[in-house]
Amino acid sequence: MVRKLFKLLVAALIFSAVGCNISGKVTDTAGNPMTGVTVTLTGADEQVATTDGNGKYTFTDLSQGSYTVTPSLPETFFTPASKSVKLSLSNVTANFTQYIPPEPPEAPLYDLTGNFLFRVESPVAASMGGGAVFIQAYIEQTGNQFTMELADYENAIITGTIDGAVYTGVSFPETWVEMAFGGGVLIDVKFKSMLLTALDDDSVDGQLSIAGKYMEIPVTDTKVTAEGYRN
C-alpha cells in the first residue's frame, strides 16, 4: 500500500513538473485565422512558435510556473498585447485578436475660439408654442479638443473633440439648465448629445439631443437645431 502511494506521488510530481501545454489561436478583426504570427513564451521555460494555417500555436512539455505569451507580426497590433498565465496541473489556452488602432482625428480646419451667439430651436418646444432661444457661449480650442461655456447658465460647460470641421460633445453639465424658448415655454434641459459642423472661423451649425421637463412633464427632443455666429 505504501509503495503504491509512493508511485502515485512520484507520478504526480512528474506530471506537475513537466508535460503541460499552453496553446491558443490568433485571429484577425473579422475572426479569421492569422497564419505566420510569431508567438513567444517567456517565464519558467522559453519557447517560440509560429501560428499554422488555422491560426493555432502550441507550447508543449512545459514546467509548472508563471509565463507570459506574446504574439508579434511586423506592423501589426494584437489585443491583448501579451497575456500572463500560470501553469499548474492542467493545460492553458491563450487567444489573441488583431487590433487596428483608430485613425487619429483630422486636424481642425477652423479655429472657433471666441464668443458666439447660438440660435437654438426645439421641435418639441415649437409644438408647445415656443420659438427659438438665444444662447451666448464662449468656445476655446486646444489641439483636437474644445470647451464650450454657456455664458448665461452657471457651471454649464460642454467639452468635446474636433475632427476636421466636426465638433462632437463628449461631456455635458450634470445639472438642469432652464431654457426659455420664445413664446413663454420654459424647459429644464439636460444635454444628451451634440454634433456641430464649423462652416468657417465665424459660423457653426448642427444638432443636439436633449432630455427635459416641461411643467414637470418629461420631454425628449433628439432634433434640436443650433446655429452659431461669432459676436
Image: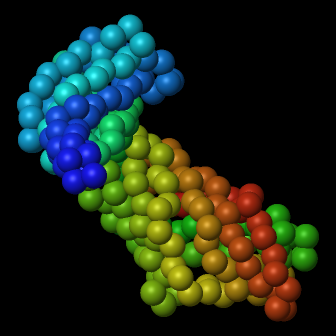
Task: Determine the residue positioned at 38% across, 8% down.
Answer: 53
Q: Nearer the viewer, residue 104 or 116?
A: 104
Q: How is the image coloured?
A: rainbow
- In the picture shown, does residue 103 fall above or below 51? below
Residue 57, quarter of the rendered image: top left
Coordinates of residue 126 in the picture (x, y in percent):
85, 70
- In the picture shown, does residue 116 fall above or below 218? above
Q: Nearer the viewer, residue 226 or 229?
A: 226
Coordinates of residue 38 in the picture (x, y in percent):
20, 19
What number of labels is visible? 0
- In the picture shown, does residue 108 fall above or below 215? above
- In the picture shown, does residue 175 fall above or below 78? below
* Residue 203 placement, left or right of 133: left
* Residue 44 placement, left or right of 20: left
Residue 7, quarter of the rendered image: top left
Task: Determine the residue positioned at 64% across, 61% down.
Answer: 208
Task: Determine the residue positioned at 78% across, 70% down.
Answer: 220
Quadrant containing the C terminus is: bottom left
Coordinates of residue 24 in the picture (x, y in percent):
36, 29
Coordinates of residue 156 in the picture (x, y in percent):
49, 81
- Can residue 59 be seen here? yes
Task: Determine the residue positioned at 47% across, 62% down.
Answer: 170
* Residue 29 placement, left or right of 38: right
